[in-house]
């Protein structure tokens, strides 16, 4: 199956209870600049939206302005979360028509939105749960983001060259789906978008004494778009995926992995900004060099910050995970630095999942 030609992830759209306050959080904790706004002042009557940017990462935060908004019930069902992963394509209509021909369900047909800055083309298909993928083409659009959005008013948010923490791009976006549904969604991405399976992890790879899950990673032809898909596996107690499905109210985006060129500097800045990260026991670092060999980073600094390390045949990678960013134990983020490795941290799974279980125990969810 040939892949639908995706250039990259264009942006990730979150649906949140209060977009202005969420923008403040991602700006001050994660170092994003708020660059655009849509809402009542820009003649958008049903919702407010903020566009945030850092490196090649674009987040869009959207909130309903009344209970008449078609998505307003989403907040009761899910809380704050990812509603759409937008994909940059050369031809929106061709990609949409081809996706439907291959079995996708349309969410919004192709349309060309126009303003004084040009033409912005868009169309959406449905994915797991009520998550969507929007095909986007902005080749003929010169505006700050899309029609309806205006550059941010400095009185609303000031830009700052001091703010970015070094996050550069999206590495991968992880979905949680129900038990028995993982292969179905792997097949969806293979059949509809032409993705291939990159790697697979079973319950022997991702398990602790109490819980387990299974995961498969799919990617597009260029490898620029990667989606790991998780499902719970049978175990003694409820896994983190079960907990997510309960509190999110179904399948959805579990976490977004963000690349940095200097994870130590990035994590230090984020910690200074009060971002909370998961911690593994200090004993993890006692045998780190035996497991991964020589690394460039200072081991004491990694232990101090709680950064994990794993290796494969092509090099090593460093990673760390935030705690959930809202009250529900659902969406969180990964910060990752790759030194040659293309892996997803298989060697860290046990330590990481035990850390997650300690948090679950505090919440009474294990």
Image (cartoon, helix red, strand yellow):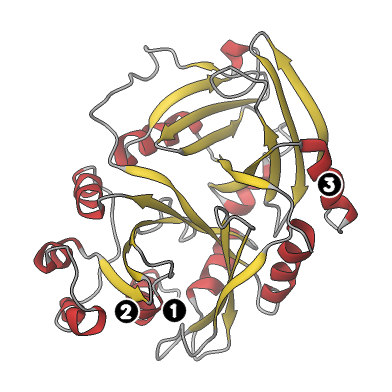
Element carrying mark 2: helix
Residue at x-position 46% and y-position 61% = 329
The quarter in which the C terminus is drawn is bottom left
Q: CA distance from mark 1 to mark 3?
A: 37 Å
Q: Is residue 160 left or right of residue 1?
A: left
Compared across the picture, whether 65 is left or right of 203 comes to: right
Q: CA distance from mark 2 to mark 3?
A: 41 Å
Could you say whether the residue bearing mark 3 is in a helix, strand or loop?
strand
- The residue that disc 3 covers is 106
Q: Is 196 placed above or below 71 here? A: below
Point out the frontmost of discs 2 and 1: 2
In the rendering, at what x and y percent does residue 63 appear? Answer: 58, 33
Whether label 2 touches label 3, CB < 8 Å: no
- The front one of 279 and 183 is 183
Comes first in the chain, label 1 or label 3: 3
Characterize the local packing of mark 3: few (<14), some (14-19) or many (20 or more) Cα atoms within 10 angstroms: some
Query: In the image, is 91 to the left or to the right of 265?
Result: right
What SS does tag 1 mark?
loop
The label number, if any, that marks residue 351 in the structure image: 2
State the residue at coordinates (28%, 55%).
Answer: 276
Q: Residue 366: which numbered mark, if any?
A: 1
Please say if 318 is above or below 85.
below
């Amino acid at each position: 199956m040939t892949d639908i030609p995706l250039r990259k992830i264009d942006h990730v759209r979150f649906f949140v209870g209060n977009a202005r306050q969420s923008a403040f959080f991602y700006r001050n904790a994660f170092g994003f600049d708020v660059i655009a706004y849509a809402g009542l002042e820009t003649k958008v009557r049903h919702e407010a939206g903020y566009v945030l940017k850092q490196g090649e990462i674009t987040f869009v935060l959207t909130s309903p302005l009344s209970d008449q908004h078609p998505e307003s019930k989403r907040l009761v069902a899910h809380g704050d979360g990812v509603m759409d992963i937008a994909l940059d394509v050369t031809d929106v209509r061709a990609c949409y028509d081809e996706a439907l021909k291959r079995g996708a369900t349309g969410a919004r047909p192709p349309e060309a939105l126009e303003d004084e800055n040009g033409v912005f083309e868009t169309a959406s298909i449905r994915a797991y749960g009520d998550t969507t993928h929007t095909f986007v083409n902005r080749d003929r659009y010169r505006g700050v983001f899309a029609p309806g959005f205006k550059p941010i008013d400095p009185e609303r948010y000031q830009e700052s060259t001091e703010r970015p923490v070094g996050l550069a791009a999206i590495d991968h976006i992880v979905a949680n789906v129900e038990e028995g549904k993982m292969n179905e969604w792997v097949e969806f991405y293979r059949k509809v978008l032409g993705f291939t399976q990159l790697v697979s992890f079973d319950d022997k790879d991702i398990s602790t004494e109490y819980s387990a899950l299974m995961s498969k990673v799919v990617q597009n032809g260029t490898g620029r778009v990667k989606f790991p898909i998780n499902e719970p596996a049978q175990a003694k107690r409820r896994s983190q995926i079960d907990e997510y499905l309960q509190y999110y109210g179904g399948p959805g985006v579990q976490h977004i992995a963000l690349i940095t060129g200097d994870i130590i500097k990035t994590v230090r800045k984020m910690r200074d900004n009060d971002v909370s990260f998961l911690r593994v026991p200090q004993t993890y670092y006692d045998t780190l060099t035996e497991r991964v060999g020589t690394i460039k980073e200072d081991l004491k600094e990694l232990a101090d910050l709680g950064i994990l390390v794993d290796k494969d045949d092509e090099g090593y990678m460093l990673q760390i995970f935030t705690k959930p960013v809202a009250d529900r134990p659902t969406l969180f983020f990964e910060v990752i630095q790759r030194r040659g490795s293309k892996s997803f941290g298989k060697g860290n799974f046990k330590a990481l999942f035990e850390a997650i279980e300690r948090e679950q125990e505090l919440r009474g969810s294990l």
